[in-house]
Image (spheres, helix red, strand yellow):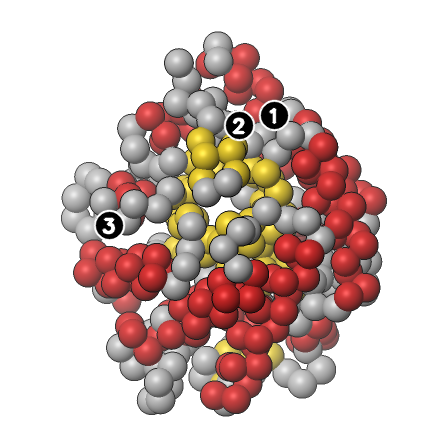
Amino acid sequence: MSALFSPMTVKRFTFRNRVVLPPMVCVVRPELAHYAGVEGVVSEVSIEHYARRAQAGTGLIMVEATAVDEGGRCWEGAMGAYADRHLPGLARLAERIHEAGAVAGIQLVHHGPQGSPDLAPDGLVGPSDAAPTGSRPAVRGLTVEEIHAIEGRFEEAAERVVQAGFDLVEVHAAHGFLLDSFLLQARNRRQDEYGGDLDGRMRIVLETCRRIRRRIGGGPLLTCRTCLFNKREEGFGAEDLETLVGGLEEAGNDLLDVSTDGVFKGWFGSPRSLGQWVKGMTGLPVIAAGGLGDARDAERAVSEGHADFAAVGTAMLDDADWTRRAREELGA
């Protein structure tokens, strides 16, 4: 029996298989752009984009990075969950994903220093002040009061998407966006409780997860996306990973989402993949992404214990029927 196409239950949600469409923003494939409107409202094009991939049999559809703040968008067509006007479109999107038999997830993000300066009238923000570099403008370090306000906007957006019918909320703490910027020593030079050692640098991530967990209750699923490949040169080690994983579990996450630069790549001087390291540190199910466009690789990721769920990004953007073709190829 195929491991990739076996069902899995997490709390009250049963995933029909382990295939995940990860949150892929349209800037990855501009020709496939399924932009929301300038107001951040879900478009019919967006709905059809996700519905098609759900109809192919995908177990979990994770909707693209959705802004929790109007000034935290990365591009003009970014989807939003920061106002009640977004509710009707989000509800239609969740409904269409459900109609196709998939679990509906959505990722929440504040783009921070990687946002679009044209969409941030008060300027780009991050953990610390940063001078302009190349084509990128200056970044202003957030005050503690502003950090708490942004955590609150994540919390409010989470309540909004759950109200719209989404089953799973993901906190985006990867790829250099705002929350991940706090984890990065190169960007976080704060000397207060949100900087310094790892406990300080991950504080905003864990506080955000805790606040969302309290706001949405125990029913919906909560996960957090992290990555380490941008921290490799900073000496982020296995003990640091264990501290982060333990913190995320304590903060109320039901799954962990690990973005990699190669799911099978060894880490910390060993042949063990990042997913295998994480799975050895927690009993939570793990989603792993990174080069799983071949059905046999996605199968291997699950069967060999690199992940409980295989996230197939670029390949599924290119082929809406990837999941159906993978099932046929594997004879599942």
Q: Amino acid at mark 3?
A: Met
Q: Amino acid at mark 2?
A: Arg
Q: Which residue is under mark 1?
A: 57
Q: Amino acid at mark 1?
A: Gly
- Tell me the crowding category of disc 2: few under 14, some 14 to 19, or many 20 or more residues within 10 angstroms, Cα based: some
Q: Quadrant of the N terminus?
A: top left
Q: Which residue is under mark 3?
A: 281
- Mark 2 vs 1: CB contact within 8 A: yes
- Tell me the crowding category of disc 1: few under 14, some 14 to 19, or many 20 or more residues within 10 angstroms, Cα based: many
Front residue of this view, candidates 159 and 201: 159
Q: Residue at x 43, y 28 (%)?
A: 298
Q: Report if residue 320 is visible in the image.
A: no
Q: Residue at x 83, y 44 (%)?
A: 44
Q: Report if residue 168 is visible in the image.
A: yes
- Say what secondary structure mark 3 lies in: loop
Left or right position of 56 against 205 = right
How far apart, in angstroms, are the residues tagged by discs 2 and 1? 8 Å
- Ranked by sequence position, the earlier of labels 3 and 2 is 2
Residue 61 is situated, as x and y percent measured from the top left of the image, at 60, 40
Q: Which residue is under mark 2?
A: 16
- Ranked by sequence position, the earlier of labels 1 and 3 is 1
Q: Is residue 100 above or below residue 25?
A: above
Rendered image quadrant of residue 315: top right
- Say what secondary structure mark 1 lies in: loop
